[in-house]
Image (spheres, helix red, strand yellow):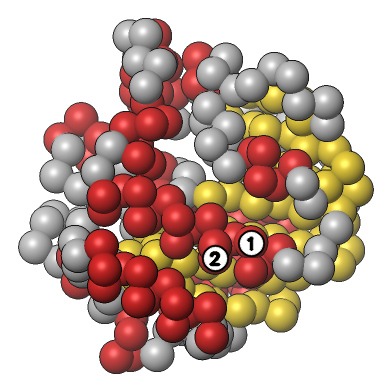
Amino acid sequence: MSDVRGYFDAKAARGDSSYVDRRWQGTPLRREQYLQTRESVLRALAGRRFQSLVEIGAGPCTWTGLLAQRSARVVALDLSLEMLKGCPGNVANVGRCCGEATKLPLRAGTVDALCSLRALEYVPDKAAAVSEFYRVLRPGGYLLLVTKNRAYGGYAPRSGGSAEGDPEKAAVHGGTVTAEELSALLRRQGFSGLAVRPAVLGRTRLVLLWTMIRLVRRLVDPASPVALPRPLNGAVESLLVTAQK
């Protein structure tokens, strides 16, 4: 994990204050991925309210404000201290913590909800991370994960399909998973009530088509306890998985 920390520390230390803007707003495709991720997370959290929530891999807190609307207290945890320095400092119910997903600096059974949005792909030992997620959640605690889908057709031509053609990023990328693999990891650890949904549908750069997809998804939200429907799986760029301890 030290390589991952160094990669993101260096990115922040370069004075790249536009990282968040470029990552999620730099192109029409990235803006669409941001919108779809946001809508997917909002649907998954609808009607839920927590006393405590931990965000794993918060980075510069791109998603933390959204999560803070659903919990009395939020801890934004990231491996990179430099990235965390980019988080807004004026949100009263958000604290920041530097730590690893596989060695969470939290007591067992103390967290109501745990969320990780587009960070799990940077964790090489996903089984160890899932074990830690289970340990820190209280009984009945809620888990929400958004991560890249290895079955996505847009990744197939690349080796591992995990770092979008960026050699520097590929060197620290822990790798993508399929819905079946992630579901199996969670079940083996003891999680129940699994639901797998599309987080981001890909394979197009046409903004009008994206808009149509979003409208359809507001009416249809396919969910499965193990995997995505086969005809849909190859078009899903990122998975959203929820579960309970």
Name the spot of residue 146 as percent of width and height, x first.
Answer: 51, 58
Q: Residues within 10 Å of mark 1 (few under 14, many from 20)?
A: some
Q: Which residue is mark 1?
A: 42
Q: Describe residue 89's horizontal placement relative to residue 178 as left or right.
A: right
Amino acid residing under circle 1:
Leu
Name the spot of residue 123 as percent of width and height, x first.
Answer: 45, 44
Q: Which residue is mark 2?
A: 40
Name the spot of residue 162 as percent of width and height, x first.
Answer: 26, 52
Instruction: Kindly identify which numbered label has been placed on residue 19.
Output: none
Residue drawn at the location 42% of the way across and 72% of the way down: 214
Amino acid residing under circle 2:
Ser
Name the spot of residue 121 as percent of width and height, x first.
Answer: 40, 49
Quadrant of residue 18 in the image?
A: top left
Q: Describe residue 94's horizontal placement relative to residue 210 as left or right.
A: right
Q: Is residue 179 visible to the viewer in this orientation of the structure?
A: no
| Image position of 92 with respect to 46: above or below | above
